[in-house]
Amino acid sequence: MMGTNEAAELAAGAVGTGPLSAADPEANASADLATPEQSPSQPGGPRGRAMRSLRRHVRAIRLVLNAMLLLALLYTVAITKVLLIPLVLAAFIALALNPVVAVAARRLRIPRWLTASVLMLSLLVGMGAGTALLAQPAMGWFHGAPAAIKSFVPKLRRVTQPLEAANKATQTLVSGASRARPVEPASISITPWDVVSTAPKILAAILGVVLLVFFFLTYGDTMLRRLVEVTPSFAYKRYAVEIARDIQTEISRYLLTAFSINAALGTITAGMLTLYGVPDALLWGTVAMFANFVPYVGAMFTTILLAVVSMLYARDVNLDVFLPPLTFAAITALEGNVITPLIQGRSMRLSPIAILLWLLLWGWLWGIPGALLAVPMLTCTKLICARVRGWTWFAVIVGR
């Protein structure tokens, strides 16, 4: 057995031989003060400063790479517009017609390919009938526009004669004589060769869109199942199915609603022009329907076009000439501010600034087709981003 004094000495020795002795407080204090200076990974140390500098460099490199990726993507979209425009148009048409195919397959047990074939045949017949109905008035107006302009010029002599006299007097004072020469309008003509050379391209584009729509309608659900099968877990599969179904439903509802509203606007415009006695009212109603897919800009373009057409076909220049464009402006104001927001709901509303910027971007990249498809693409992008994690900020920015 060990004595009490020896046990105390051993305990004191064990405590004194530890890494920090409790009996030596000055040594412990000096060790605590020396620890921050000896740790290079602290925020104030050289290693911390190096890590912060490295993170800044990484962020700068990432920003430059993202900008280069965006520019490369825009360049790719611009040079592949011949391929992408029919693809995007076919995707929108398929999304708009997919509820019909889905209901026929689920409730009536009709195969998807059969319903898609009937829809495609109906669409082709409708497009052919509409083209045959509008081709002759469009070509007649196209060829008769120069003659109509020449016949309309004398009607404006009473309005423009004082301006012409002032212009001649100004030129006489500046140059001593009026050297203005009349400029003959360039003749516009379309030869049969132009029609023959352009027809195959148009028919190929239409056929490509029709085939794409048919395959999207027939095999769309199969493609969705294949995409869901590659997800890693059951939770991800369920989340992917819910997101895909919600997006498909919302986009289909938006496209059908937009097309119905624009078709109603075109029909009302054609009826209004018929009451006012404007020739080719059905042609201008169709133009108003398609132009209304471009918010703000489409309504302004159609209003100016109707004003020009009304003046060209008017017998005399008076205030009655401006009744058709003013009535159309009132109709579009009611449609854009009351009817469309009431039917589509808040989730479909977009910021006017976002719409104009999006129109400028896609009009610059794809021209007139890009301007027509810009707002549907922006709306669909907003609906997708609102339901995908990490992209809700874009839906908030472009929303209204």
Image (tube, rainbow, N blue to C red):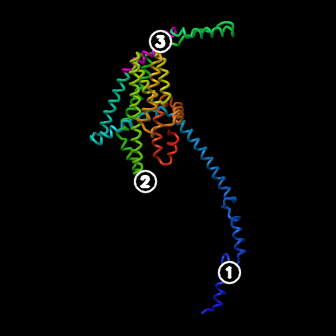
**Percent x, y of residue 386:** 47, 44
For marks 1 and 2, the one nearer the N-term is 1
What kind of residue is marked 3? Ala
Task: Please determine whether, in this image, residue 72 is positioned above or below residue 42.
Answer: above
> What is the number of the mark on residue 232?
2
Q: On the image, which quarter does residue 234 sit in? A: bottom left
Left or right of 25 in this view: 318: left
What kind of residue is marked 2? Pro
Residue 138 colored in magenta in the image: yes
Q: What residue is at 42 percent from the left and 21 percent from the top?
A: 284
Nearer the viewer's eye, disc 2 or disc 3? 3
Where the N terminus falls, by quadrant?
A: bottom right
What kind of residue is marked 1? Gly
What residue range appears in magenta?
132-154
> What is the number of the mark on residue 211?
none
**Percent x, y of residue 175:** 69, 9
Nearer the viewer's eye, disc 1 or disc 2? 1
Foreground residue among 26 and 248: 26
Left or right of 272 in this view: 146: right
For marks 1 and 3, the one nearer the N-term is 1
Q: Which residue is mark 3?
A: 148
Label 1, label 2: how far apart the Cα atoms are: 58 Å
Label 2, label 3: how far apart the Cα atoms are: 67 Å
**Is residue 308 visible in the rendered structure shown here?**
yes
Give the crowd class for mark 2: few <14, some 14-19, many >=20 residues within 10 Å: few
**Percent x, y of residue 73:** 53, 39
Q: Which residue is mark 1?
A: 16
